[in-house]
Image: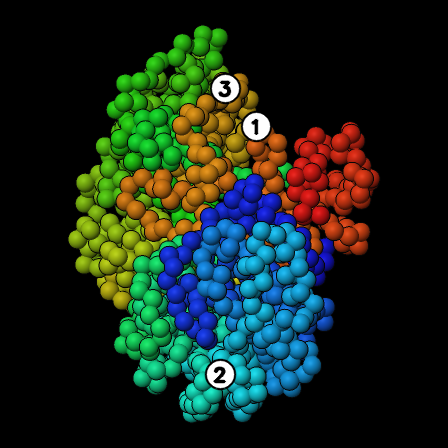
Amino acid sequence: MSELMTPIPFRQLMTWISAEYARDGSVFGVQRPFHPSGKMLPIFGETIETPFGPAAGPNTQLAQNIIAGYFAGARFFELKTVQKMDGAELAACINRPCILAEDECYNCEWSTELTVPQAFAEYVKAWCACKMLAKQYGLGDANGFVFNMSVGYDLEGIKGEKVDMFLSGMMDAAKTPVFQECIAVLHELFPEDSDYIDTISPHISRSVTLSTLHGCPPEEIERIASYLITEKGLHTFVKCNPTLLGYETARSILDEMGYDYIAFDDHHFKEDLQYEDAVPMFRRLEKLAAERGLEFGLKLSNTFPVDVKAGELPSEEMYMAGKSLYPLTTAMAARISREFDGKLRLSYAGGADAFNIDKLFACGIWPITMATTELKPGGYQRFTQIGEILERFPFEPFSGVDSLAVNELARSARHDKYHLKDIKPLPRRKLTEKVPLLDCFTAPCEGGCPIRQDIPEYIELCRTGRYTEALTLITEKNPLPFTTGTICAHRCQTKCTRNYYDESVHIRETKLVAAENGYDALMRSLKKPAPVTDGRKAAIIGGGPTGIAAAYFLGRAGIPVTVFEKSSRLGGVPMQVIPGFRISEAAIEKDIALMQFYGAEIRLNTPAPSVAELNVAGYTHIFFAVGAGKAGRLNIPGNVVPVIQWLRDLKAGKKVSLGHVAVIGGGNTAMDAARAAIRSGAASATLVYRRTKRYMPADAEELELTMADGVRFLELAAPVAQENGRLKCERMTLGAPDEKGRRSPLPTGELMEFDCDTVIAAVGEQVEGELFTANGIAVNAKDIPGFCTNLENVYVGGDAMRGPATVVEGIADAQRFADIVIGAPHTLSVPENAHVTREEAISKKGILSPPTVGCEGNRCLHCNTVCQVCADVCPNRANVVIELPGGRHEILHVDRMCNECGNCAVFCPYDSAPYRDKFTLFLTRSGFDESQENQGFLPLGGGKVLIRLEGKVFEADPASDDRLPPDIALLIRTVLKEYSYLL
């Protein structure tokens, strides 16, 4: 497919808007319009109903992008920058994909990829369309929004014919063909509003933001700004680069906030505008504009150039924005507002969103533009919440910036949880599956769960107070709701789409709410099954979580089952090893009681019989669910104890070695040991790891709890020997990142030591392979067997098959074993009241919402009902939701509107890129031929289409051609008939 976009003709644009709004009440996929209260703010001799909007960038490049933003609530539009290099020439210089907004944002694109005349036409079309939307749909005052031009990057180019004509046309478009066409089309489409249409102003813009390239000399910046003020008579903002802060300041801020991996040197800081040159220049320009009755201010800030180090984008340098730019930009605002006593107007762009927009506006900083927030799930709809937040403030003309408040804002930004980098690298958010061509809506939380819990459904039941129904649904697949509701590794939460809004829905805690509130009623409702009498009988070796789960699943099916547990208690590691401050014995006992209800025979203090003995005893199926209990070795001299035994003894009430404790390792078990040592009276607890915290395998949550408990972290250290109350360690350093960005620890030869009486080795537990080999079970080089062993009807699961695993992975193995014994997968029915409507799911899109205590049903986005993330995040609206007869919804990719920015590929929950992998509508044969990867169709007229499907290209009539799968034929017919404005 081509990266070149084809603008939509104005008539088609308005037809699309009218048809979509009439059918769905939406415009370009934005579902909820913003209705301003009527308040106004003056700027540039014009007025705005809200003081925010999209920054110059991907969200102000095409007419439909601007219109979508307006419908959602934006009223100040910084249009995408135009310069002398444009169109195909510029597009060829941009590597694709060019946007990565997964966390902080990076891009490697800059000015408009259209030609300058095309860009002008897009802005005129958007201007006229927004004027009409205001009137048609009651979106406020038609004169309540402002278009702010952005131009660059040198005076020669700006004075050149191409950009000069752009500036002149934007200032007065009355005589331009595109404006005249737009007015004529509006008269034709809306004859009842003819008088209103005649009042639409041709003065598209009276203001400009000057954007200059890094390294632009101060004299050139001043010449350009002076030209725009004196020769063009434009209200002017000068966009400043974050390099104005100085290298040391920028580096220290980012390092302090966890962005130490962001790579840049000082060359831009040396080449860019210097603060001592900037201040007098800004004073001169401020005076120059005032003399001409024009407004002057600064735009803070431009994106920040950094190096590509881990293959983030296909470029050598990229531009940083979003959450990590916020502390830099607020620091710039604080410094400049102090310098000018708050009298210089500051326009803002740099990580603004619904969590900080109120703080910025309260400081007197406006207008505020943003790009990263609307590139994330929720898309343009995020503007609606921002508008609602700002509506609560009084609107007063600009009277100055509150320097003290900005200074406090900049200080607090460095500790703001939504701008600090997570302590651990982001986990993989994507599923492993490829996106289906059709029917792709999915709940990624469910896909990330090893047992595919019905998460959105039980969360909805919790939300409505139906705890017993929620717990009933949970226990269909999960017999350990208390255990998993407390200590589950919750991989579901790493997949949750709300991570891209604020933080994940607290799924694990919601499960525990259901367990605690629904358990008694659930136990009363249980019924014993009819016993299976065909001779099937299962033996389970090990009474930990995996064994308990297997016994539950089999018992529920009526199959006789015996659990052999060598210790005196069921519960395994959670009961016998994990400290009580993490999970109580009472909680585990409830899970055990749930299993025991179905009648499993429990044999405690019973070592595992051999497979032969079990076969003789009549067991037809055998499941090894033993843990990974063999201690990993730490080969250093001294008082070294294995972590599992130390924790087991501590929990059993035995005397354990304490004093000054050092825990070697970085996993969750190491965190447990260090926290337990502190809580048990150790003189100190130090966690020693050869890499940094960022690379520790422990969950971020466990890491943060360990830090909060006062455990000392000794990073980049490898233990050498413990003796005489001291632990000697060698300092390590991190080598260069590999292709995946991971840095290996390298020894330095430098030694250090600290007080240490006890070394706890938490360096990984291993499977006891002797148990399997003694039974003739084949194992691999790590002494681990496969799930299906070489012995008939003998299976292995949990830690014994995976190595140290999570509880929920053990449950998945238990269910797999039970399904084999039962002879069929378990089936279940989900209560109807566990589902939400499409309208209810859509109502949550675009709303940032911090976590709450207890059930988190109000924050769940119900992605299984409505996903369409690819449609939400596309700046150009190139992924369109199509409603089929019967109410199903599908995603259609529209080739001509896509510039391959890659944003949809970042956020699609599948391991896929919707702009390549979803069914595609083509405008031209050349576009069809270029796009060999895309399956899709090209309308040929007369009801015929050219199809590419499963590697074949052929002409077809979707009304009758049986070569087309029925669902594909229905989609094509629907587009041709009901969505003809896309063609």
Which residue bears the numbered disc 1? 790
Which numbered mark, 1 or 2, is in the foreground of this view?
2
Q: Which residue is at the far top? A: 533
Q: Position of residue 778 (x, y in %)?
A: 55, 33
Residue lying at 75% horizontally and 40% vertically, measured from the top left:
949
Which percent across, then down, holds residue 272? 51, 85
Left or right: residue 681 compared with residue 543: left
Q: Tell me the amino acid under the disc marked 1.
A: Asn
Kindly indicate the quadrant of the structure image that contains residue 586.
Answer: top left
User: At 50% from the left edge and 50% from the top edge, which residue is drawn?
Assistant: 137
Q: Report the amino acid beneath label 3.
A: Val
Callout 1 secondary element: loop
Choose the circle earlier in sequence order: 1 or 3.
Answer: 1
Question: Which residue lies under the disc numbered 3?
Answer: 821
Apparent side of residue 289 relative to residue 727 in the rendered image (left or right):
right
- From the viewer's perspective, is residue 154 above or below residue 695? below
| Callout 1 touching callout 2 (CB < 8 Å) | no
Which SS class for mark 3?
helix
Depth check, mark 2 against mark 3: the one in front is 2
Which residue is the site of mark 2?
269
Residue 97 location (% of width, % of height)? 62, 60
User: Which of the two residues, 576 or 741, is positioned nearer the viewer here?
Assistant: 741
**Label 1 to label 3, Cα distance in Å?**
17 Å
Circle 1: is it few (<14), some (14-19), or many (20+) Cα within 10 Å? some
Task: Identify the mark nearer the N-term, 1 or 2.
Answer: 2
How many marks do you count on the picture?
Answer: 3
